[in-house]
Image (cartoon, rainbow, N blue to C red):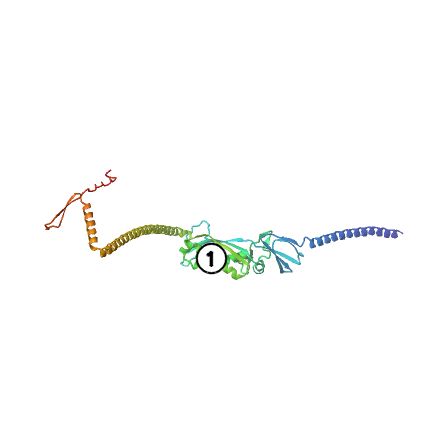
Amino acid sequence: MDSRENIDHDEGRFGKGLAALVKSLRWAFGIMLGIIILMLIYFVSFGGYFSVEPQQTVLVLRFGKIVDSLSSGGYWFVPYPVHQFVRIQTNQQFLTVDLTAADDGRAASALTPGRDRYLLTGDANIVHTSWNIGYRVADPVKYYTTLATPSAPVINGRAVADTVETDGDGFTGTRGLQTLLKSLFTQTLLEVTSASKVDEILSVGQSVYNEKVLTRFAAAVRDMDCGIEIVSVTLNRISPPAATKKAFEDVTASGNTRDTLRNEARAYEISVRNDTMAKQAEILADAETYRKKVVAVVRAESTYFDGINKEYQQSPETILMALYTSTLSDALSELDGNKFILGTKGEVRKQLRIRLNPETKKPAPLTEEKK
């Protein structure tokens, strides 16, 4: 009887525990079901939604394969693991390449390979330069499939820096777009600088030097066909080594003095040439005026002579008498007296002539000095 009671007591106790376990499982199942439903709702709604910010491009990868390239706006795709989204900055970015000596407080009497960065010119001189490069991603798909490292070029709206890697020999370096551009640009600088003279790139030829570097570097990047476009290459600073800077400054100063004197000489040459040309033009104008005057006088006399000659042909005696009278009147008008004896030396017959009612000679006008 006692054993039967114990069995009933154990069954009642286990039954309550089993009921509590079943109730707990039901609650757990309900919670898990709710979580699954919420995950499904998020999965088919917000989980696949994203927006593309300005100056960005989003590449859509379906199981690792690029299926679309999206610009600014809002989009929805089935989320991971079906689709992945890679953001790439397409706005202009800048990169600085500095090839100058290390500034560690030591005397710059010599350059140390591996520590100091410098370039050799075609005439065996050393120069230091600093450059600013502007570039942008022109073809995001080609850029991502050929150069993109790391796999997520943009995180939280900012471009990710080049990754640091160590090779099998223990050498540590960076790997990525900026490292590639720096290496390619340095190679271009070595080629262009080695074909130029130091006087050209330190003074009058800086713009030409800058243009050569830009043209060759942009062509090298285009030949890589990696989706990158070079926007600008600017030479920020160029200088000789510190130990020889004073000598180069003296040379530059003497060159400036030479140019100043040369410009002054050219200005004086132009001034003298202009004065000479002005005087020449004045002399030629006076000569032309005099020529026209003489020609006019000669033509007038020629016309007068032709007229007299024509009349002389018709009546010689009359014309001779008229000319004689006119000549005699002109000659007598220059004399002050009123009585004249005419006749040549040795002639017996003389003529006495008296001017009747002579004209009163007008006094000459007073000049400023006589006044």
Residue 146: x, y in percent? 57, 60
Whether residue 318 is visible to the viewer of this picture, yes or no, is yes
**Residue under label 1:** 213
Q: Position of residue 297 (x, y in %)?
A: 27, 52
Q: Which quadrant, please, contains the C terminus? A: top left
- Describe residue 191's horizontal placement relative to residue 297 as left or right: right
- Residue at 52% of width from left, 60% of height from top? 222
The answer to whether residue 175 shows anywhere in this view is: no
Q: Residue furthest top?
A: 371
Position of residue 68 in the picture relative to residue 190 (left or right): right
**Count of numbered circles on the image:** 1
Q: Amino acid at mark 1?
A: Val
- Whole-percent x and y of residue 34? 74, 52
The answer to whether residue 64 is left or right of residue 217 is right
| In front of the other: 103 or 135 | 135
* Of the pair 259 and 173, the residue shown nearer to us: 259
Q: Residues within 10 Å of mark 1 (few under 14, many from 20)?
A: many
Instruction: In the displayed orientation, state which residue is furthest to the right.
Output: 1
In depth, the one of 340 and 202 nearer the eye is 340
Q: Position of residue 322 (x, y in %)?
A: 21, 51
Nearer the observer, 339 or 131: 339
Quadrant of the rendered image containing residue 65 = bottom right
